[in-house]
Amino acid sequence: MKIIKKESKLCLSCMQVHEVWTVQVEEESTFNQKKVKYLALYEYCNMTEEYIATEEMIIGNDIAMKDAYRKANGLLSSRDIIDVRRKYNISQSDLATLLGWGKKTLTRYETHQVQDMAHNDILVKIGDDPEWFLILLERSREKVSERAFAKYAEAARVLYAREANSYIKKAVLAQYAKEHMPPNAFGNTEPDFNKLVEVINYIASSSVTSLYLVKLIKMIWYSDALNYKRHGKSITGMAYKALPMGAAPIGYDQIVALQGVSYQEVEFADGIGYLFGADQDFVPHLLSDDEKASIDTVVGRFRDASKKAIIKTMHEEEAYKCTEPYCIISFDYAKQLSLS
Ligand SMILES: [Zn+2]
């Protein structure tokens, strides 16, 4: 028996006011013909040496017992089921509708009723597969409110993009491992690819002229460097290499393939150019006001600059001049950035 708390109150065992203990006890019960061990909560009276369960404890202990059974049998716990639903920000009855189950099914699964294996598999799959969620949601469009539909779809799209991007993220992080990193290569920020996607969209939605790849990646570097200069940390956490055309994030060719980044291919005499545009319904969620202000300054400076002009400006930065060709640029140089 483990004492969780001691509280002076009316004891339901001896019916006197005294210090009542809340205790945790290991119990064993049989459920579905299987023995399960779990931790149950009780109130304990040390006068009568009795354990008493409040209404709330009876419900909690029943869930604890069933969760122990679920765990032993490879099923999602009631908490896991709640987490699946929270991923999509969806109500119990709407998720039940999407899955074609009775309205109260999920309410029961999140409490006292243990789901069968078939329903369990469906819940596991829906938790892991936002694309499938979107298909089911589309199918039930008429059955949920318009507002709820938009909210669930947005949550699923964010999850989907995050998943699609995790492969690219791994590939870029693997490239980092091969490079010689100077101190302060990331500008005090963990690489954040979702934020990078926002930075790209934020720049692209600021009516920048001819936003081709070279101009875009320069503007991302300037945004990170300026934010570092102002606030001591970069925005995206990308590491940049000193290439002949200026700073470029490691793995920039893969980064532009991130889900949520849109571009058009434009044919030129000397090859194909990638013209970036903002995602149609782009709204920044992750960028702080300070970060947006840094990007705004960079956009203000380079909005109409040609690729040549921005490369020329970059070549005059200390960060570029002081870094050996093809080496990683330290954010320490951001202090001398030409922008402030
Ligand atoms: Zn008592």
Image (cartoon, rainbow, N blue to C red):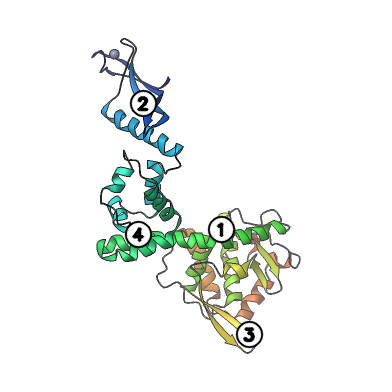
Q: Is residue 313 above or below residue 123?
A: below
- Nearer mark to the viewer, of 3 and 1: 3
- In terms of sequence position, does the residue under pointer 2 or pointer 4 come before the other? 2
Amino acid bearing label 2: Leu
Q: Secondary structure at mark 4?
A: helix
- Reading the image, the residue beneath label 3 is 271
- Reading the image, the residue beneath label 1 is 230
> Marks 3/1: CA distance?
38 Å
Q: Secondary structure at mark 3?
A: strand
- Nearer mark to the viewer, of 4 and 3: 4
Q: Taking the image as drawn, is residue 118 in sight? A: yes
Q: Nearer the viewer, residue 256 or 168?
A: 168
Q: Residues within 10 Å of mark 3 (few under 14, many from 20)?
A: few
Q: Nearer the viewer, residue 301 or 50?
A: 50
- In terms of sequence position, does the residue under pointer 3 or pointer 1 come before the other? 1
Instruction: Name the side, left or right, on which 76 lies relative to 182.
Output: left
- In terms of sequence position, does the residue under pointer 4 or pointer 3 come before the other? 4
Q: Residues within 10 Å of mark 4 (few under 14, many from 20)?
A: many
- Reading the image, the residue beneath label 4 is 152
Q: Which of the image's four quarters has the N terminus? A: top left
Contact? badges 2 and 1 (CB < 8 Å):
no
